[in-house]
Image (cartoon, rainbow, N blue to C red):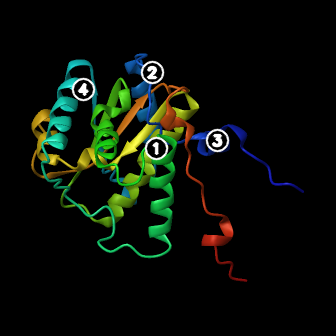
Amino acid sequence: MPLACPDPVEHAVRSRKSVRGFLPRPVPLELVERILSVAAYAPSGSNIQPWKAHLLTGANRDALSAALTRAHYEGTPAEREYDYYPTTWRSPYQERRRATGWGLYSTLGIAKGDRAASSHQHARNYAFFGAPCVLLFTIDDDLGKGSWLDYGMFLQSIMVVATAHGLATCPQAALANYPDIVKRHLNIPASEVVVCGMSMGYEDPDAPANQFRPSRIGVTDFLTIHK
């Protein structure tokens, strides 16, 4: 017999993607709060629920965007508070990383070696790709790796629930590149680590960047069955 398919859930997971072009249409605050309230059911070790979130819209969103964009174009060194990527890339991760980066830039018409165009595209992270609202996430700096794993489940839950409600998202580690700026603008204490950000809004279907979607490896590439 074929496996039963929980269609709404599976559809939300499969259709979720990182959107890099949003419509200026406002997102109702009550909808964002509902999404977060559902995502808060994500599991966490001993139910400590280590996540903390900040929602920015309007003038506050624009002020943070301006500060981060200025830091980018002024060449301010990124000082992320944790290692997101490996210090040395190796196969197969290097190939997957390159395929995604080159695939996106090719879709946007950015040639290899075009530093100016690449810099401009990277700066769009700090404009939140035009999304009307952005979430910034932090975690207390004395929590362990288990809590960071829990955080990932919380973030995934936000994105899936948002998709189910017709919203688009883009999780952004780039928003953790300048933690001092983020903390200053949001009055976040030094004892918290900026984990990432997430742009949220309604997808612009005509945005060129949204025409690209990276592939996924097959189950047989990561699954070992023990009988």
- Secondary structure beneath label 1: loop
* Among the two numbered marks 1 and 4 on one chain, the one whose residue lies closer to the N terminus: 1
Q: Distance between the residues labelled 2 and 3?
A: 25 Å
Q: Quarter holding the C terminus?
A: bottom right
Say which residue label 3 marks: 9
Location of the N terminus by quadrant is: bottom right
Amino acid type, residue under disc 1 in the picture: Tyr
Question: Looking at the image, which residue is at 56% across and 46% down?
Answer: 213
In the rendered image, residue 215, in percent from the top left (x then y), is placed at: 60, 54
Identify which residue, 90 or 221, lies in the foreground: 90
Is residue 110 or residue 24 the one in the foreground? 110
N-term mark: 2 or 3: 3
Cα–Cα gap, marks 2 and 1: 29 Å
Nearest to the eye among marks 1 and 4: give it.
Answer: 4
Mark 2 Cα-neighbour bin, 10 Å: few <14, some 14–19, many ≥20? some
Q: Which amino acid does label 2 sit on?
A: Leu
Q: Residue at x 45, y 52 (%)?
A: 153
Residue 169 at x, y = what percent? 45, 36
Instruction: Give the percent coordinates (x, y) of residue 12.
Output: 61, 39
Helix, strand or loop at label 4? It is: helix
Q: Residue 61 carries which label?
A: 4
Q: State which quadrant residue 25 falls in.
A: top left
Residue holding disc 2: 23
